[in-house]
Image (spheres, rainbow, N blue to C red):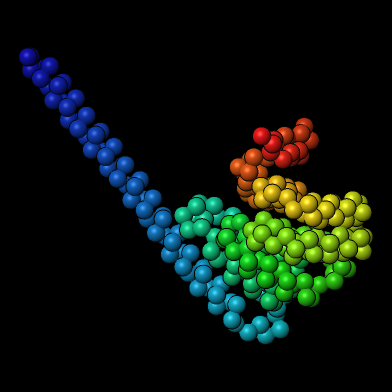
Amino acid sequence: MSKSYNFIFKYFFILLSGFSAYSLQLNLLNKQSKVSNDQFFIQQEKQLIAKSTLQKKMPSFGLNNLIADWNFLQYIQYLGDTEAREVTGYSAITNYFETIVNKDPKFVDAHLSMSTSNSIFAGKPTKTVELLEKSLESITPSSSTYPFFLWSYKATDEVLFLGDFEAAKKSYRTAAEWSKLSNVEGKETIANRFLDTVAFLDTDPDSASAQISAWTLVLSSSSDQNVRKHALQKIEKLGGIITRKPNGTFEIKPPKKV
């Protein structure tokens, strides 16, 4: 082999070795970066839980509404950090929810948003029902634009997660009564939808159909895209037939009987 070829070969070998070492180092750094990020998210979650737990116990000094608003903003930021939540989950949601209910039981919009997240993402539907019941003690049909949805969300949890059809039927009936007393456009249609659900539950439906009905109500009532995606996945898993309409809405049919 000539000197020139020998030089080129050595140069190529050194370059290849250097590139391999760089690639190996880069992969190692990426893995270390991911581990570092995961550790940061886990540590951050512990701090958020400690902080939100402390907020539940702190005196309000007459600033209940302000504390509730602040916790809702923290909850939105927390829920929106999907990269962190993929690592840690959503365990702090319940603390934010409980603080808001305790400080401002009439904060209907916050309760509606957090009830679904607490049941689905935090996995605490029993606590959700408990907090909604506490909120409803301070609310009347005229408290806000959509207070009747608190009853329907509670009913959804009672059917979907707790399997308590009797409690759910009572909640849906109350939701219908409250919607009729509201000033919302189409209130009769809304009330009839709740009563149709009661009639459906009176037929003692099989579990899958009942759950599809409840998830469909979640789908139609929530504007949160994560919740809607989760509801569609559940409906599909239960055998429901999903058809997306041109206007972006969905038509849900029960599974075909074999």
* 187 to the left or right of 105: right
Residue at 74 percent across and 53 percent down: it is 204
How far across and down, in percent of the image, does residue 94 sit? 59, 67
Residue in the image at 67% along x and 50% along y: 207
- Taking depth in this image into account, of 196 and 188 the one nearest to the observer is 196
Give how far across and how far down residue 32 sits, in percent.
Answer: 33, 51
Quarter of the image with the N terminus in it? top left
Q: Is residue 172 visible?
A: yes
Q: Which is nearer the eye, 1 or 176?
A: 176
Q: Is residue 23 above or below residue 194?
A: above
Quarter where residue 17 is shown: top left
Q: Residue placed farthest to the top in the image?
A: 2
Q: Is residue 226 left or right of residue 37?
A: right
Q: Position of residue 57 (x, y in %)?
A: 59, 81
Q: Residue placed at 72% from the left, 74% from the top?
A: 134
- Residue in the image at 44% along x and 61% along y: 42
When the figure is inspected, residue 2 is found, relative to residue 99, above or below; the finding is: above
